[in-house]
Image (cartoon, coloured by chain):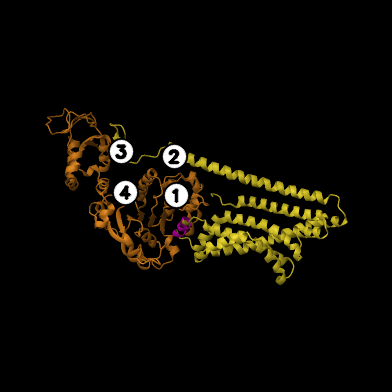
Chain colours: A orange, B yellow
Amino acid sequence: MPEPTTHTSAARPMIELQQVTKRFAGQAEPAVKALDLSVPEGEIVMLIGPSGCGKTTSLKMMNRLIEPSSGRIVINGEDVTDVDVDQLRRTIGYVIQQVGLFPHWTIGANIATVPRMLGWDKKRTAARVDELLALVGLEPKDYRDRYPKELSGGQQQRIGVARGLAADPAVMLMDEPFGAIDPVTRDRLQDEFLALQEQVKKTICFVTHDLTEAVKLGDRIAVFGQGGRLHQLDVPAKVLSEPADDFVAEFVGGGAAVRRLALVTLDDMPLRDVLKAGAGRVSRGDLVAEVDGGGKPRRWASVPGHEGRDIPLIYVDKDASLHTAVDEMLTHHVPVVAVVDGARRLVGALRWEDLVNERDEVVATGSVGAAAADAAAGA
Amino acid sequence: MSLSTDGPASSGAHEPETAAATAERHGVAAAEDARAARRTGLRSALELVISPVVAITAAVAAVVVMNGDLDEIEARALATDEVLRRVVQHLDMSVRAVALIILIAVPLGVLFSRPAFERVRGGLVSFLTLAQALPPLGVMFLLPSFMGFGLTTAVTAIVIAAVLPVLRNVLVGLERVDRSLIEASRGMGMSNLQTLLKVELPLAVPVILTGIRVSLVLAVGAAVFGAFINAGGLGYLIDTGQKLARGDVTLVGALLVASLALTVDWLSAVAQRLLRPRGL
C-alpha cells in the first residue's frame, strides 16, 4: 500500500506534458486537449477514465507511438518532441495489455530485445536476463530457453514487465498490463508489481480502467474525462474523499467511501481499550476479553450492548486495512473485532458503531488512536 | 481470508494460487494443445507419406512402360538418357521460374503490406484469390508472339502461371501478424525495417512457404507448356506422343510430370517443417 503522500511532491518531474493536444484526422474534437501532466520521479501515476477519454492516447504520446499535434513533452529534462523516436523508445520501458511477446523468440531473447538493440555484449545481456527473470519470480534456468506459448497468461505478463525493465529505463509506460488477466492472478501480479517497484523505483505511467487497481497501485491518480481533459491529479485518498468536480465524484461513484477503507490501516485508527477479564474492576460499558498468559485474546467476556449473545472473537492484524476489518465483521456477523500486533498480542478493538457514528472524526484523529492502542498494549 | 472463527484474519494478503489450480489450468490447456497437435500431426504425417508413395508409383509405372514392348519410334522417344534430359529440362524451367517468383512476389507483397497500401490491400487479396482460379494459358500462348520462342519465354510464362499464390500468401501472412506484436516491437524502439525483418517476416514464414509450395506444384504443371515453344521439358514427350499417335510416349510424359509435381510437393512439405520458426 503506498503511503498517502502530501499534496505536492518535492521530487522533480520526470515526465512532463505541456499543453499537449492530439487531433486525429477526420475528428472534429481533439482526443487530447491542451493537457498538462507532470509525473514526479519514482512515482506511479495511474491514468484512469471512461473509454475514449484519451488516457491511452496520452500515454502513447509519451513514447510518440502517437505523435502529438501540438505541445511539448519533456522526459528527464529533455524535450523529446523532436528526437529520434527509435532511440527515444529504447530508453522508455513499454508494457502493453496483450503483452506482445514475440512467439518465435525464447523468453530470454524476448527480454533481451532492447539490450541487444543498444549493443550490450552477450555476457552482460545474459546476466541481465537472468537477473530480471529472478526479479519477476521465475527461475532463470527453467524459463530462459522456453517459448512464450509454454507460459500461462500471468507468467507471460511477468515476462512483459521484465522485458520493459530490461535496459533499466528511468521511465516505464504501462498500458493496462493486467487488464486481460484473471482476477486472482491479477491481484497477485499487482502485489508483485508493488514489491518490484519498491526495489526499482521507476517513474511509471500506468493506464487502467479499474478504479480498484488505480487506488491500489497509484501514488497518484489522474482522472481523465471526455476530450482528453484532466479533471484531477492527486493522491488516491484525496481523489476518493475530495473529488475535484462532479465528473470525478460521479466517476469514483458511490463506492468511494468503501474504497477509501482500503487506504486506512487499523494502526491509523483510534481503537477501543479492551480490559482483560479478571485483571481489575469492570464497569458496565467496558469491553472485556479473556487473554492468555502471552497476551493473546481468547474470547470476549463482555461486549456492551450485546449482552447475552455469544460473540465469536475475530482478530485482525493492526497493519491490515480498515477494509479488511469491515470485511471480517460482515463475514462473521460480529459487531466488533479484536486488533492484534505481529505477535498476536491484543492491542485494542474496533467496533462497528465507531465506524458508522464517528468515522470522520476517527480518521482525523489518527494519533489519538495510536495512543489508545499503546495504552491497551501496555495494560 | 480465514474461514474459521478463531483463525487470524489475513492482513490484506492475497491468497496464493494453489498449485493444484495452476496444474489444472495448465493441464487443460496442455490437453487441448496435445489434441490439436495430434490432429495436425496426423494430417501432416499422412501428407508426408502419401505424396512420395504416389510419386514413386507414377515413376515406376513410367519405367515399366519405357521397358515394355516398344516400336522403333517409341524406343527412340523413350530412350533413358532422352527421358532424363527432358526431366532435367523440366525441372530447370520450373525451378528458375519459382526462384524468379520469390524474387518478385516477396518484395511486392511486402510493399503492398505497408500502411500506404492499406486501402487497396483488401481488394488486391480478393483479386489475387480470384485470378488464381483462372487458367493463365491464354496469356502463355500470347507471349511467344512478342517474346519469341525459347527458355526465357517459357520461364516467363511459368512465372505468370504460378506467381499469384506466393504474392497472395505474402500479403495474407504479413496481414495475419498480431498487431500487438508490431506495437510492442515499435514501442520498444525497433525501427520499421527491424520490425519487418525480425518480427513480421519470420512470423509470416509458414504462410509464405505454403504459397511457395503451391507455386512449385503449379510451375511443374505449367512447365509442360515449354515444349510448345521450343524449351523442351516433359511436355515434349506428351506432345510427340500425340503427334505420332504413340499413346505410350504421352503416358510416360504425363506420369513423370505427375511424379515430379508430387516429389516437389513432398520436398517442400519437408522444407516447410524444417523452416517453420520454433515457438509457433
Badge 1: few (under 14), some or many (20 or more) residues near its Cα, within 10 Å? many
How far apart, in angstroms, are the residues tagged by discs 1 and 2?
18 Å
How far apart, in angstroms, are the residues tagged by discs 3 and 1?
29 Å
Identify the disc placed on residue A159. Answer: 1
Instruction: Report which residue position mark 2 lands on.
Output: B22
How far apart, in angstroms, are the residues tagged by discs 2 and 3?
22 Å
Q: Residue A84 sits in which quadrant? A: bottom left
Residues at discs 1 and 2 in contact (Cβ within 8 Å): no
Q: Is residue B185 magenta?
A: yes
Q: Is residue B183 magenta?
A: yes
Amino acid type at mark 4: Thr
Residue at disc 4, secondary structure: helix
Looking at the rendering, the stretch of residues picked out in magenta corresponds to B180-187
User: In which chain is the residue bearing label 2?
Assistant: B
Residues at discs 2 and 3 in contact (Cβ within 8 Å): no
Amino acid type at mark 2: Thr
> Is there any visible trace of residue A131 in the rendered image?
no
Badge 3: few (under 14), some or many (20 or more) residues near its Cα, within 10 Å? some
Camera-near label (4 vs 2) is 4
Residue A163 point in image, percent of width and height: 44, 53
Q: Nearer the viewer, residue B146 or A266?
A: B146
**Secondary structure mostly taken by the magenta-highlighted segment of the chain:** helix
Camera-near label (2 vs 3) is 2
Badge 4: few (under 14), some or many (20 or more) residues near its Cα, within 10 Å? some
Q: Residue at x 70, y 72 (%)?
A: B146
Instruction: Report which residue position mark 4 lands on.
Output: A212
